[in-house]
Image (cartoon, rainbow, N blue to C red):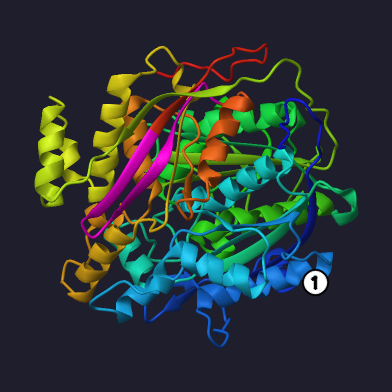
Amino acid sequence: MEETMANKKINIYVGATAMRTCLGDKNETLVAMRSNVSGLKYNDTFKMYVGSSSIKSMKGFTRFESMVIEQISNVLLQSGLHLSNEDCQLVISTTKGNVELLADNSNDIPEQAFLYTSAQTIADYFNSYNQPIVISNACISGVSAFVIARDRLLSGACKHAIVVGCDVLSEFITSGFASFKSVSSNPCKPYDAERDGLTLGEACGAVVLSVEPTQAEKPYIYLSGGAISNDANHISGPSRTGDGLYYAMMNALAEAGVTSEDVGFVNAHGTATRYNDEMESKAIAWAGLALKPLNGIKGYIGHTLGASGVVEAIVCMEELRLGFLLGTKNLIASDASWNLKVSPECQRFTQQCCLKTASGFGGCNAAIVLDMKMRDTFREGQVSVPQVVAHYQLPASDRPFAEYIRTLFKSLGEDNMKFYKMSDMSKALYVAVEKLLAIEGFEEVEPTRRAIILANRSASLDSDWSHQQILNKRLPEGTSPAVFVYTLPNVSAGEICIRHKMQGDNTFFIENQDSGIAERYARSLIVNNHADVVICGWCEYLKGHWNVNVKLLKKIYNGTIDSGIKRTFD
């Protein structure tokens, strides 16, 4: 029987770590960063600066799978753990996996392009006892994977978790970001007044988390807190207030049992886009962290998408042990509205506690706390109990989907013209949730206490296919940002967050339909008092076929635990 953190104190130790970036392996990357060396170079194929790694494909595996296998092998060798042991859980974070395989298939989607198939291939390589958990939550995927792994460890579902994040570069990805005009013409400059966009990179990082101190690397570092939130504002643009990221940061700190005064430094997402860095500066200041040393490392290795949270967390772990944080590469002078303590030079810090943040498309945000001090986070009070109060499944139909879903939408009596611009999966989910909430709503629940947890097997392959077909045409104007933004499955959840002002957890799992991993996590949010209501379920759409089945969970016992972070923003 799984236990919860509400009735047992468990420490989550950081164990072995490994990574590969455009600067090399872990040691090579850290040495280069300390020497202020960047791995970003102009790439003639992609027509932009990128951070490319040198890894080649293993026989029978893609580059993505090869990178993941390499880093998992490294941490397993260091730790002596085996994924064939039932106490060991593999958690993979990625945004696009093997998406480049779509370019070589003009008629159909190859099976290995499915994220879960690729993940299972990796798990099978290690004879994994447990099914892999796959998180695809845009650019917060890596940080989200830590939050989900921590939940599994605290629940007693496993004793050890291998968290691995990976993404590889492809024209699919570079063309999509180029369509948003968000790519810098030079190596990116996080927080600098002259910043003009991001630089993409590829990387893979792996971390062992364990409840057993024998697996911990010394001196000990604990994963002591984590939280996920949503802006409920826009699917591709950062919130102008920073409230969503603020909620994730404050809830992560509360989960860890620390305050802003206990934080030694902040490692921010720092994409170097005009609005992302400004949004983060506001959230960091509101959280009382403006005077804390801060850095962003994407000027060294680029934005590595689903790998970024894991790779950057590994760097944070090394910084905690060294006692100083790296400078922010390419920064000359910041123009943030808040005078953050960000510097191109290395900085010392006084508290051995780090807050790592991430933000991404779909309005998602995440934060984790890495701490060198053991904190007492035992929670008093009885836990809440989740109960299904409503359920809705989008009916099957022989009619063409476009005609069918338009009819259903019109029956809702709404005039939301944005609906017609959504991806088909987003439309299907939108209608299903509207029908669900017509049965039972949650109007009285605080927005930060509303969560949505979804799963499917195909991720966003339907939109991926559409984007690839546009790319194949080689149009002078390039690919479409309106299509590319939906090549992330969590953006469908982001649409629901905007529509129903849901600012709590919004994680998207990729799994087999009978896995039940996503629903267990949804229930744990209520059990551990992280949410009062959760929309959860299956959200699948691929080439005209759909299966959308959602339910509404509510807590039926209001315990004595504090109800969460609340703040009003202008």
Which of the pair 277/469 is nearer the observer?
469
Q: Quadrant of residue 185?
A: bottom left
Which quarter of the image is occupied by the N terminus? Answer: top right
Residue 559 part of the magenta-drawn span: no
Residue found at x 76% / y 61%: 85
Q: Label 1: state its secondary structure.
A: helix
Residue 505: % across, % down: 50, 34
Image label count: 1
Residue 247: % across, % down: 54, 28
Q: Is residue 155 left or right of residue 536?
A: right
Residue 528: % across, % down: 64, 27
Which of the pair 359/429 is nearer the observer?
429
Query: 343 above or below 438?
Result: below
Residue 537: % across, % down: 42, 39
Query: 113 above or below 488?
Result: below
Residue found at x 42% / y 56%: 457
Q: Is residue 32 visible?
A: no
Q: Is residue 9 visible?
A: yes
What's the residue type where badge 1 is placed? Leu
Q: Label 1, on which residue?
A: 77
Which of the pair 221/337 is nearer the observer?
221
Residue found at x 49% / y 56%: 189
Residue range (magenta): 531-550
Which quarter of the image is occupied by the C terminus? Answer: top left
Q: Main secondary structure of the magenta part?
A: strand
Residue 548 part of the magenta-drawn span: yes
Mark 1 surroundings: few (<14), some (14-19) or many (≥20) residues within 10 A = few
